[in-house]
């Protein structure tokens, strides 16, 4: 993509009308409008996070992380992501293998269904699990009789997170593997390699950047999800509060330093995600 | 035609089986529960919930603000995409990477940060206050939050289409005497129109369902600044599962319509591309 853009700029240099004042006006007008818009809606809020987090000084900032409830929220978020991301990665690899390597009926329906969670409001993504496992839900009484809690507990949080991040790895890998084709895999099989060996030695190295890309985006969404988790969590401090939910509680208690301190961690995570994403794109990987 | 075409590659049964099983348990079964819970309601209860004054007020805000946000992004998304593909300026690559920030940034963080910036004493809010413009805790704030979180969809939809516009065509038109506006209207716009509309629809779809960033800045007054997803949460908190499911079904139906529109637009875009390339 960088190469394509460079050549686009290259051809522009010699264009007639390039140096007229109208052109310059449009050019600088566009750049100024874009930057102002981004500054107002993007950079100002980002800067606010750090300014507010450090508004009482570094000591108060560090102190915010001494709170056991905050630490519990961080731990819960990490545990959830540590379970959800690998599970969705295995699903993504499996879905991509089935869809990209074989021709079968109903394939386009399957692809649409995998993308479904992206089109659904996070609140609905959480609600469906409340309808299933909540006290008044389908399995509510049975679960209560067997003393199993899913809603307002860790399993519910994981299920809701899994639902919203479900398509992330699959939708990177499916188009990538479709484009790369089956020739090398078929050659490996013909030469006597087993299925797993072909997968690990041939397919996985080919799609590794797409895999990293999908996993990083999946992780960012898993750690940052608010709506779906908010519905199923029950907001029990120190127990079922993930980082985004804990931000809400601290903010509503006017503990701004605490709220923005936790928010600053998630912002750093977002920045890290963008850096990895940009690095992956530098390898020549392009989203399809 | 048999179910699948023959292939020497192994693992079809295993991967397809796992994929459909996992898809069914995590996504399809829960969604079926929603559909059943919503449709098992008595018809009059369903209508009463879905068309209650409070629900209608929430649709007005959710759809109105989402449409407005998608329109703002149609304009600014195009300008940003145009700037990033056509002009080189210091920091262009950084700006290009930053566009995806709202994808990566958790919505709760966007919510509290925007509220702080646009509150009466915030960095930007304090300059709007004397002008009589209140952003935080009004519908304007809701629109602003929705604009922020749906912006990448608009930019990223238009960017590849703009890269595909053939500069030779523009130059040919210019040498034949076409002005800048004519070139834009007759050459560029027809090529990027499907992408613009796709971006608009994607941005709208994301905005309608958004919850996290909005609830902080909206103030959440019933009938005034209460979005539909929040009303669903309120129903759930009162253990009114059926009411919540009814509203959820309405939103789900709209998601399907939007999804269908996106697919049709993308199919149109591909046809249009083929037509232009000829």
Image: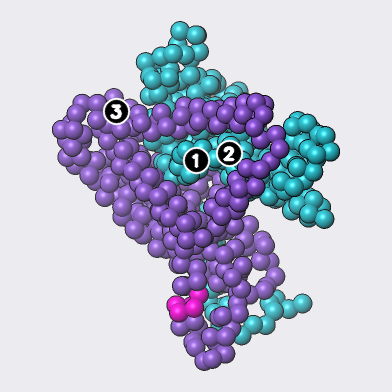
Chain colours: A purple, B cyan
**Secondary structure category for the residue under label 2:** loop
What chain does mark 1 sit on? Answer: B
The answer to whether residue B15 is above or below residue A164 is: below
Q: Which mark is residue B87?
A: 2
Dot 3: within a 10 Å radius of its alpha carbon, few (fewer than 14), some, or many (20 or more) residues? many
Q: Which residues are magenta?
A: A199-203
The answer to whether residue A145 is above or below residue A180 is: above
What chain does mark 3 sit on? Answer: A
Q: Which mark is residue A84?
A: none
Q: Do marks 1 and 3 share a chain? A: no
Q: Do marks 2 and 1 share a chain? A: yes
Q: Would you say the residues marked 2 and 1 are in contact, meaning their CB atoms lie under 8 Å apart?
A: yes
Q: Please report the residue visible at 44 percent of the width from the left and 45 percent of the height from the top.
A: B104
Q: Please report the residue visible at 30 percent of the width from the left and 29 percent of the height from the top.
A: A51
Q: Which mark is residue A52?
A: 3
Front residue of this view, candidates B208 and B111: B111
User: Residue A22: x and y, percent?
Assistant: 67, 26
Front residue of this view, candidates B184 and A223: B184
Which image quarter: residue B106? top left
The Cα–Cα distance between marks 3 and 2, rounded to whole angstroms, is 35 Å
């Amino acid at each position: 993509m960088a190469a394509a853009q460079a050549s686009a700029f290259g051809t522009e240099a010699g264009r007639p009308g390039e140096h007229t004042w109208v052109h310059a006006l449009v050019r600088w007008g566009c750049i100024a409008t874009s930057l102002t818009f981004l500054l107002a809606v993007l950079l100002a809020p980002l800067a606010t996070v750090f300014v507010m987090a450090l508004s009482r000084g570094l000591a108060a900032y560090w102190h915010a992380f001494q709170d056991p409830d905050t630490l519990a929220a961080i731990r819960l978020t990490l545990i959830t992501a540590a379970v959800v991301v690998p599970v969705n990665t295995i699903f993504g690899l499996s879905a991509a293998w089935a869809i990209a390597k074989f021709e079968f009926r109903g394939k386009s329906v399957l692809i649409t269904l995998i993308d479904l969670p992206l089109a659904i409001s996070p609140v609905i993504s959480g609600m469906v699990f409340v309808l299933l496992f909540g006290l008044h839900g389908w399995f509510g009484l049975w679960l209560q009789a067997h003393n199993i809690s899913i809603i307002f507990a860790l399993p519910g949080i994981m299920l809701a997170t899994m639902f919203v991040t479900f398509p992330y790895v699959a939708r990177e890998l499916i188009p990538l593997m479709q484009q790369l084709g089956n020739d090398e895999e078929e050659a490996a099989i013909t030469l006597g390699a087993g299925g797993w060996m072909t997968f690990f030695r041939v397919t996985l190295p080919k799609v590794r950047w797409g895999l990293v890309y999908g996993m990083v985006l999946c992780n960012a969404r898993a750690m940052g999800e608010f709506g779906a988790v908010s519905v199923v969590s029950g907001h029990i401090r120190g127990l079922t509060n993930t980082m985004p939910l804990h931000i809400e509680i601290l903010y509503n208690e006017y503990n701004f330093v605490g709220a923005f301190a936790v928010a600053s961690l998630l912002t750093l995570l977002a920045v890290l995600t963008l850096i990895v994403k940009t690095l992956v794109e530098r390898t020549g990987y392009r989203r399809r | 035609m048999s179910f699948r075409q023959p292939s020497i590659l192994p693992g079809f049964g295993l991967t397809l089986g796992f994929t459909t099983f996992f898809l069914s348990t995590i996504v399809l079964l829960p969604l079926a529960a929603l559909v059943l819970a919503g449709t098992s309601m008595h018809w009059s209860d369903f209508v009463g919930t879905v068309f209650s004054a409070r629900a209608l007020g929430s649709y007005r805000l959710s759809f109105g603000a989402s449409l407005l946000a998608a329109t703002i992004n149609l304009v600014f998304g195009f300008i940003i995409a145009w700037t990033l593909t056509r002009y080189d300026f210091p920091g262009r690559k950084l700006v290009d990477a930053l566009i995806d920030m709202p994808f990566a940034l958790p919505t709760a963080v966007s919510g509290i940060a925007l509220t702080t910036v646009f509150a009466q004493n915030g960095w930007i809010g304090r300059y709007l206050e004397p002008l009589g413009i209140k952003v935080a805790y009004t519908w304007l704030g809701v629109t602003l939050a929705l604009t922020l979180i749906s912006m990448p969809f608009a930019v990223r939809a238009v960017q590849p289409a703009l890269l595909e516009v053939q500069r030779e065509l523009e130059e040919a038109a210019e040498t034949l005497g076409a002005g800048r506006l004519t070139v834009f209207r007759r050459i560029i716009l027809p090529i990027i129109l499907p992408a613009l509309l796709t971006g608009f629809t994607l941005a709208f779809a994301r905005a309608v369902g958004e919850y996290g960033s909005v609830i902080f800045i909206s103030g959440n007054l019933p009938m005034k600044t209460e979005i539909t997803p929040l009303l669903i949460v309120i129903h759930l908190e009162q253990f009114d599962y059926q009411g919540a499911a009814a509203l959820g079904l309405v939103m789900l139906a709209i998601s399907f319509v939007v999804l269908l529109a996106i697919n049709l637009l993308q199919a149109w875009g591909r046809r249009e591309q083929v037509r232009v390339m000829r």
